[in-house]
């Protein structure tokens, strides 16, 4: 990780308190209930990180359901780019929660580059503070079945969200 950033494990109770929003469907509710912990990336207020922060999430077991929860908090007036890369094979139910502080800016890229047999369902929830900016790009290139729900909520005026997705499928998907 770049200097000044923190990546740590937190309890499900703390994750629920810090989450961008409540679960929006059955899968995201089950993920919140069954995650044994959550991963929190903290980007401090006022910091600037021009190089992408890459978090690799790799599945290794196609037979066991994995309940994953990732939280990203961007402090007020901070700037960063975060890339979540999913790969391998898994039955993955994942919540991603992004909270962007007042005047902060985040470029968020989520790549689902799963192997052919992988199944992924998830919720990408974002909450933007006053005058905050989010540019989100979701790219799905693999997996047997991938279903992602993306939501954006605003905590104050002036927030701007640019949300884009790109999905490729072949005959087996």
Image: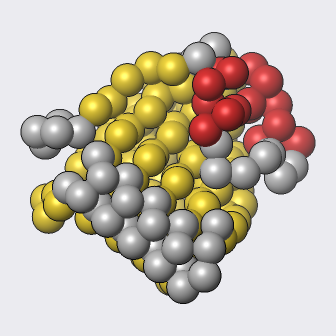
Look at the image and tell me whether residue 50 can be seen: yes
Tag count: 0
Residue drawn at x 17%, y 60% is 48
Quadrant of res 158: bottom right
Residue 4 vertical position relative to residue 65 in the rendered view, above or below: below
Residue 63 percent coordinates (x, y): 65, 20
Left or right: where 33 falls relative to 127: right
Q: Nearer the viewer, residue 105 or 35?
A: 105
Left or right: where 130 falls relative to 57: right
Q: How is this picture coloured?
A: secondary structure
Left or right: where 109 falls relative to 172: left
Residue 171 percent coordinates (x, y): 63, 65
Residue drawn at x 44%, y 20% is 9
Residue 69 percent coordinates (x, y): 58, 33
Residue 95 percent coordinates (x, y): 63, 42
**Image quarter (top left, top right, bottom left or bottom right) of the N terminus:** top left
Look at the image and tell me whether residue 95 can be seen: no
Residue 4 vertical position relative to residue 155 in the rendered view, above or below: above
Residue drawn at x 38%, y 48% is 85
Residue drawn at x 70%, y 46% is 121
Quadrant of res 18: top right
């Amino acid at each position: 990780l770049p200097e000044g950033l923190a990546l740590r494990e937190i309890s499900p109770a703390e994750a629920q308190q810090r989450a961008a929003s409540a679960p929006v469907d059955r899968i995201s509710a089950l993920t919140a209930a069954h995650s044994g912990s959550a991963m929190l990336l903290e980007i401090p207020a006022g910091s600037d990180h021009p190089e992408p922060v890459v978090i690799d999430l790799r599945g290794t077991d196609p037979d066991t359901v994995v309940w994953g929860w990732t939280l990203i908090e961007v402090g007020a007036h901070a700037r960063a780019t975060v890339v979540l890369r999913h790969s391998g094979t898994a039955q993955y139910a994942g919540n991603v929660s992004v909270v962007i502080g007042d005047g902060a800016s985040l470029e968020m890229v989520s790549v689902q580059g799963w192997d052919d047999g992988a199944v992924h369902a998830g919720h990408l929830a974002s909450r933007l503070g006053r005058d905050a900016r989010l540019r989100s790009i979701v790219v799905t290139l693999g997996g047997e079945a991938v279903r992602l729900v993306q939501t954006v909520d605003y905590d104050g005026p002036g927030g701007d969200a640019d949300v884009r997705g790109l999905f490729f499928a072949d005959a087996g998907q």
